[in-house]
Image (cartoon, grey):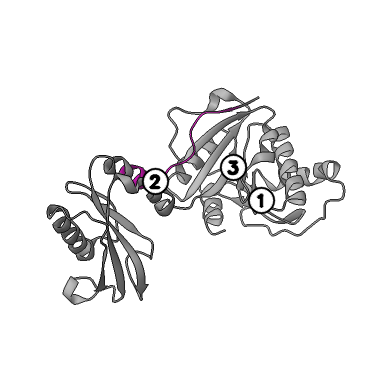
Amino acid sequence: MRLRHNPLPMNHHLDDCLRRLATDPAILVSVTGTRGSVPREAGAWMAVFADALVGTIGGGHLEWDAVHQARDRLRAQRTSADTWTHDVVLGPSLGQCCGGALTLRFEPITAADAPALRPRLATPLTPVALFGGGHVGRALVQALVPLPFSVRWIDSRDEVFPHPLPSAVQAEHSDPVAGAVSDLAPGSRVLIMSFSHAEDLDIVAGCLQRQRTQGDLPFVGLIGSRTKWASFQSRLSHHLPDRPAGHHRQGTGGDRRLGGGPVVAFAATHGSGVNKHWAGWSAKKCLQELYTL
């Protein structure tokens, strides 16, 4: 049985912007080009309303001046489609010592622009599939929410998910839980930490089988000790008898706890076999590794 509890992830700033735009015009200020050291990269944006500000282009005098320009236009009620740009050098005259330069684009927007703004401004989110609704899974969800990930949280027990869920998290009851592997989003980073070793094994096997046929799961992580992973390697030979042995790299820590956190073994899949895995890393360290992929 499959049951999903939450809508697809959304971008908080974008949602706020579009909600306000339904009743009030705004000036969209975007960073379109940069040189040298700057506070925000190209693509950063903020929407300036008469009485509100959504998003940021880096703060400081740079942002204050841009807001002032945008609100001058709003007060003049000149909300035509005319746009303008402004080149800014981040030096002593602005009270900012970044030393770089950037180009800002000012664009009047109204409710009529909303359908085009959503795909244009949405932050790309990397898909993460998290199997397991226990205390470690909950902690990882909280750690992932503010990061640019869309989280699909899966468990065979329907009652384990907290309510309400963050908007970037989609909870799913799947029984058998490994059945969810087949329709994971391509490119998903998979984290496996269910309440059952048997479930973990089935999920790992499903991921390796999918990797063999589709090659679209760049990272698969398994919670546990070196001993658990050694046992799984032996059992996986029955699921995938011709699975290449691959190679692996052990992390530091062995079977001991690091900083009071759970021991985690992570595996990154490549081709049809396991490319490498990390054992004995804390959950925080594993998140750092996941974020760099």
Answer with mark 2 or mark 1, whichever residue precedes in sequence: 2
Q: Quadrant of residue 199?
A: top right
Q: Which mark is residue 86?
A: none
Q: Looking at the image, which residue is at 35% across and 75% down?
A: 35
What segment carries the magenta color? 3-16
* Quarter of the picture holding the N terminus: top right
Residue designated by label 1: 217
Q: How far is disc 1 from disc 3 in space, using C-alphas?
A: 10 Å
Q: Looking at the image, which residue is at 39% across and 53% down?
A: 121
Q: Is residue 260 visible?
A: no
Local secondary structure at mark 2: helix
Residue designated by label 3: 129
- Indicate which label's residue lies in the foreground, 3 or 2: 2
| Neighbourhood count class around disc 1 (C-alpha, 10 Å): few under 14, some 14–19, many 20 upward | many
- Is 206 situated above or below 177? below
Q: How far is disc 2 from disc 1 in space, using C-alphas?
A: 32 Å
Residue 232 lies in the magenta-colored region: no
Residue 187 falls left or right of residue 122? right
Q: Nearer the viewer, residue 266 or 186?
A: 186
